[in-house]
Amino acid sequence: MLSKKNGVSGKLSRERPGLISIHCIAHRLNLGVSSGWKSDIHLRTLNKMIYSLWKLFKQAPSKLQILKNTKWRIWAILRVKFVPLTLDGLQKYKAVERVLKLCPFVMLALAKLDKNKDKTATELLKELKDLKTVGHMKILTDLYEIIDPINNIFQKKNISIKQLKISYNLAVHSLSHLTLNNNYGPLFESFSEKIVQNNYKFCGIKLLHNEGDLEFLKKRSNDLAKLILFDLESRFQDLDVLEKLEIISFENLNKLKHENAYFHSYGKQEIEYLSKHFNLNTQNCLKARNKIKIFKFSDKTIPEEEFWRLVLDYEEFRSIRTIVETFLELFQNSASSKQSFEIKCRLTL
């Protein structure tokens, strides 16, 4: 999609050289945490197994009832469902977390189906009782707990890059810690200690294992943390630029007071930085910044869509238009992306 040669972005840019190509920041997170699922054989196997579990119970109400009966009241307390892992990004990790919660009860349900000569249930039970399977789910759930707070920010109506940077830096710090030898997430660390003490029994069920499986999982914990850390860092290198773009947000402009000394200096350093980043004339951008502030202050009741429509149309704001367009493209959450796309089309066409 974003390739400068044969992607949609590249082909459109050749038709309209002035177009700006922007990669959705929410989509970056999904790509950053899901790339390993395509290349890693163990994750692909886990993906296939959980999808098969979902399919087994989803398509057979009688089998699903066996699972519900196994859980009794706990089913109503947890209220979790199997999710097929055909979804992208964090949905895969969320599905693993849900299956892990249901794991002991799923094993019991599969054991009952196994007695009834259900071949699919027999194969799935064998896979689910494998130490590597449960260990991977523990590792992935630990990783999910680290990266999910970033995703929560993208679900808010108004995205704050300042909050995003804080959450991102915490995630990077936690992932960096997990890349070191003998450092593991709390779930997997507890699991690796108790499984040996309990003679490789998980929730009372003996897990199938080979010598060296636990050491293999410990290395996997470090390797998967490294994989996600690398992908996230490579996709969020421009957070400083994004944070500075927030100075022209409608909400921030609306809070400015003309009589305050801060009004005149507001955004100066940020615009200087952004003008250099986008290779624009700094003095012209600073002049346009002042005009935008005065324009917004002159009409406190103007709707946001109308405000940006006028900013993009007026010739006196043209020197800063690239910065404004980049801001309007980036600061949208996933829930309102379709609506915001339609608004921006009406603004620019």
Image (tube, rainbow, N blue to C red):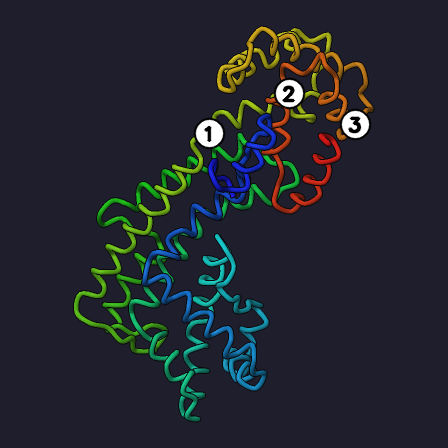
Q: Which secondary structure, mark 3?
A: helix
Image quadrant assignment for residue 44:
bottom left
Quadrant holding the C terminus: top right
Which residue has dot 2 on it? 321
Q: Residue at x 29, y 78 (%)?
A: 206
Which residue has dot 3 on it? 306
Q: Residue furthest bottom?
A: 116
Q: Residue type at mark 2?
A: Arg
Q: Residue at x 73, y 37 (%)?
A: 343
Q: Earlier in the sequence, mark 2 or mark 3?
A: 3
Count of numbered badges drawn on the protein? 3
Q: Earlier in the sequence, mark 1 or mark 3?
A: 1
Q: Is 265 displayed left or right of 256 in the figure?
A: left
Between 74 and 301, the one nearer to me in the picture: 301
Q: Which mark is nearer the camera, 1 or 2? A: 2
Q: Residue 77 — which label?
A: none
Q: Residue 238 — which label?
A: 1
Q: Is 250 displayed left or right of 269 in the figure?
A: right
Q: Residue type at mark 1?
A: Asp
Q: Which secondary structure, mark 1?
A: loop
Q: CA distance from mark 1 to mark 3?
A: 29 Å
Q: Position of residue 279 (x, y in %)?
A: 51, 16
Q: Residue type at mark 3?
A: Glu
